[in-house]
Image (tube, rainbow, N blue to C red):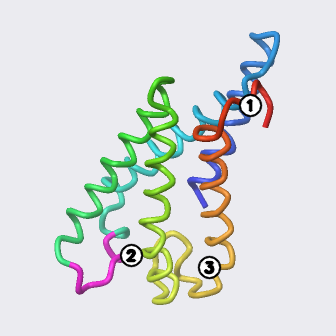
Amino acid sequence: MAVLVVLLATFAVAVLIQSIRLPSINYRLCGQIALSAMFFFAGISHFLLADGMVNMLPPVLPFRYEIIYATGLIEIALALGFLFSQYVRLTGIFAIAFLIAVFPSNVYSALNAVEFGGNVAGPIYLLFRVPMQVFLVVWVWVTSVKGSLKGSL
């Protein structure tokens, strides 16, 4: 839920700043800035909250902390990629693949009521998480992968 708040709040601030400073708003750019903030926030969280996040992985998986740290680094790299216009499309493609790849850990966490990130609610949490994951994939697609939108979503 926190990543969604970071995404939407950053988007709103970026739109507000552009509306004050520029004659037209580049919504794609605002969306990319918001993605950068969201992935940076999520990536840093992997280092600050590693003990909670490691529980989102099945105990049979080896190197669970290393996986958490590696995915945190990937998210920070994605955050940086969204800031460089020449890499935005490629970053978007990688971000979509990443979001799909990490989704099973959210399913595992919800089914096992892991006490982290809302998963303690159990399988019912997936009623929120699945649409949110789809929303994030669509957000990345629209703002970063799909052809030029010329300032509109």
Q: Secondary structure at mark 1?
A: loop
Give residue 126's mark: 3
The magenta region covers: 54-61
Q: Is the residue 80 above or below the residue 126 in the image?
A: above
In this rendering, would 58 be left or right of 122? left
What kind of residue is marked 3? Leu
Badge 1 is on which residue? 149
For the C terminus, the image quarter is top right
Amino acid type assigned to the residue bearing label 2 in the image: Met
Q: Residues within 10 Å of mark 2 (few under 14, many from 20)?
A: many
The crowd level at tag 1 (other Cα within 10 Å; few <14, some 14-19, many 20+) is few
Could you tell me residue 152's position as x and y percent? 80, 31
Rendered image quadrant of residue 59: bottom left
Q: Nearer the viewer, mark 3 or mark 1?
A: 1
Q: Kindly state the secondary structure of the residue where label 3 is placed.
A: helix
Vertical relation: 38 (above or below) 52: above
Hey, what amino acid is under mark 1?
Leu
Mark before the other along the chain sequence, 1 or 2: 2
CB contact under 8 Å: marks 2 and 3: no
> Percent position (x, y) of residue 84?
46, 24
Instruction: Provide the residue designation for mark 2.
Output: 56
